[in-house]
Amino acid sequence: MQKTASAHDTAQAVAERLAERADHARDRMHAAVDSLHHGADDLLHAAPNAFSRAAAQMEAITRRGVDRAREAGHRVSDSAHLARDRTLGYVSNEPVKSLLIAVAAGAAVALLAGWLSRSRHTTRY
């Protein structure tokens, strides 16, 4: 009977160790699931903040681009006003020379337009 009791005790010890290992594995699995759950919660809370930061950065970049374009437009406008003022001053100081330059420029444009229309006309046929 001693062998039966000994085998019974051994089987019971093995069963207890298996139960402990199963409990330990279950606890580790629960810990892993909890960790995964907390990580998902952290991600859900972090994602809107990341999108908000990205949107704010894009808005800032857009605003800087618009400001730079506006500044460039002002510089072009200022340059155009300066060129206009210089031209008006030249025409006021040198009216005959200005008229001759305008006539020569008009004639050059007319010659160029005539030459272009003839070269197109001759290449079609």
Image: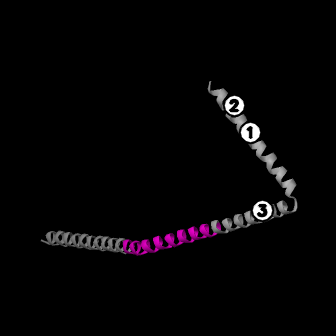
Say above or below: 102 vs 125: below
Q: Is residue 122 above or below residue 81?
A: above
- Identify the image quadrant of residue 64: bottom right
Please say if the residues under marks 1 and 3 sit with CB atoms less than 8 Å apart: no
Observer-nearest of 117 and 92: 92
Residue highlighted by disc 1: 112
* Element assignment for label 2: helix
- Please check the rendered image and state whether residue 97 is part of the magenta-colored stretch, yes or no: no
* Disc 3: CA contacts within 10 A as few (<14), some (14-19) or many (>=20): few
Which amino acid is tagged 1?
Answer: Leu
Residue 67 in percent (x, y) is at 62, 70
- The picture quadrant where one finds residue 78 is bottom right
Residue matched to label 3: 83
Residue 80 location (% of width, % of height): 73, 63
Q: Which secondary structure type mostly characterizes the magenta part of the structure?
A: helix
Q: Position of residue 44 (x, y in %)?
A: 39, 72
Q: Is residue 67 left or right of residue 54?
A: right
Q: Secondary structure at mark 1?
A: helix
* Marked residue nearer the N-terminal end (2 or 3): 3
| Secondary element type, mark 3 | helix
Q: Total of numbered circles in the picture?
A: 3
Q: Is residue 88 left or right of residue 46?
A: right
The tag earlier along the polypeptide, 2 or 1, is 1
Residue 58 located within the stretch drawn in magenta: yes
What whole-number distance in Å separates the C-alpha atoms at marks 2 and 1?
A: 11 Å
Residue 13: x and y, percent? Answer: 23, 73
Q: Tag 2: Cα neighbours inside 10 Å, few (<14), some, or many (≥20)?
A: few
Q: Which residues are magenta?
A: 39-68
Q: Residue at x 65, y 29 (%)?
A: 121
Residue 119: numbered disc: 2
